[in-house]
Amino acid sequence: HFTNAALLARRHAAVARGVGQTHEIFVQKARNAELWDVEGRRYIDFAGGIAVLNTGHLHPGVIAAVKAQLDRYTHTCFQVVAYEPYVEVAERLNALAPGDFAKKTLLLTTGAEAVENAVKIARAHTRRPAVIAFTGGYHGRTNFTLGLTGKVVPYKTGFGPFPAEVYHAQFPNALHGVSVAQALQSVELLFKNDVEPERVAAFIIEPVQGEGGFYVAPVEFINGLKALADRYGILLIADEVQTGAGRTGTWFACEQWPVAPDLITTAKSLAGGFPLAGVVGRAEVMDAPAPGGLGGTYAGSPVACAAALAVFEAFEQEQLLARSRAMGALLVTRLKALAEKQPSIGDVRGLGAMVAIELFEGGDVHRPDAALAKKVVAEAARRGLILLSCGTYGNVIRILVPLTASDELLEEGLAILADTLAALA
Ligand code: PMP
């Protein structure tokens, strides 16, 4: 019989300290939007394993599909002996991705791998070296994706040197004083001061910054970026690792853009709790790397593909895209009402069910309150609600609750958040 404290002691002795841990809790079991720790305490899960559980813990359809797959085969390596579920996931993603052009897909295992491969493909197609990413962006923990990531502490600290030919322009953020015009100007400044546009293979941008703080990229900015991309033959990559798989009310957030990106990265909720990632995009771009240039031993694992096909099924059967929009509307309404009572909440925002509140000392947007965010996360957990913070300033509380959670459970979680803020005010 284990306690959280005993397991934590073993963890600290055995696991590298660089691996963070938000909550001093060890899970015993989990169902849909609830989990129980090893001491039997129940929690409502508003974190969803960092955007992985849009269909909830142990979705019955996903688990049944995985169990059935386990009786057929678990691994051949797609590049050695192929299997149908990989092809079907690719067909489904090609059909879901926006854009009036032929598409192809590459499957991988993690979000960082998807981003790395999107850049490889963009370079192979354009025969250009440079990539422009944005301040506050997060793209992963491998060396290239760390290079793309626009936040030093804690991700990049001590891990350089980072790859050459990565440049950062400003992400538009009205709340923190960066207008769309300024952000577009910062791209033009890169062209003037650092890299000629003819050397740039791609822009990579999150439709809603995830780790960076749930800031939504304004549509006018995307239009401006696309105009620059078209003028100079630069590709547009949407990193949808966190925004994808229905979180924002459409399968891909970029479906809400007036223009289609050339490449999209996806991972996290794609396979309902199993490791699967992909790059979906313009067929002729995706086909730029020669045969043998792409792949991975575990890339597109049949077990994860079976899970993903069950996720697509669940979205249709349970109308989870409509649910994502309705849930987002409910969350925003409740959180705006809470903001009326809690001056520390300086902003409530989101796209679909990708919703966050941002905390400030006395509601002053010049004084981000990371300490309060930290206290809220810890106190809410004591009261039975698992939350995650994020943001350039560490002062954002984000909600990534399963779309399969009931309104009743949502209200229960929101009430804990309200009580927590009231207790800490
Ligand atoms: N891109 C984005 C937008 C992400 O949010 C993340 C993960 N938080 C990644 C890439 C990296 O994904 P992974 O952790 O699966 O490598």
Image (cartoon, rainbow, N blue to C red):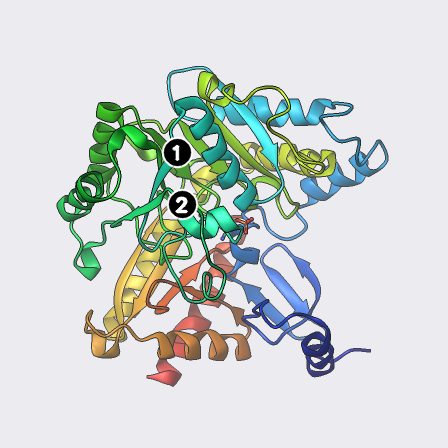
Q: Which residue corresponds to mark 2? A: 164
Looking at the rendered structure, the kind of residue marked 1 is: Pro
Look at the picture and state if 270 lies above or below 136: above
Element marked by disc 1: loop
Q: Position of residue 14 (x, y in %)?
A: 73, 73
Whether 292 is drawn above or below 305: the answer is above
In this rendering, position of residue 314 left or right of residue 237: right
Are dots 1 and 2 in contact, CB under 8 Å? yes
For label 2, the crowd category at 10 Å Cα-Cα, with few meaning under 14, some 14 to 19 and many 20 or more, is few
Q: Quadrant of the C terminus?
A: bottom left
Q: Is residue 267 visible?
A: yes
Query: Which residue is labeled 1 in the image?
Result: 129
How many marks are shown on the rendered structure? 2
Mark drawn on residue 97: none
Q: Residue at x 31, y 75 (%)?
A: 369
Label 1 or label 2, whichever comes before in sequence order: 1
Left or right of 188 on screen, residue 167: right
Q: Nearer the viewer, residue 402 or 265?
A: 265
- The amino acid on which the numbered mark 2 sits, given as a three-letter code, is Ala
Q: Is residue 248 left or right of residue 295?
A: left
The N terminus lies in which quarter of the figure? Answer: bottom right
Residue 186 percent location from the top left of the image: 19, 46
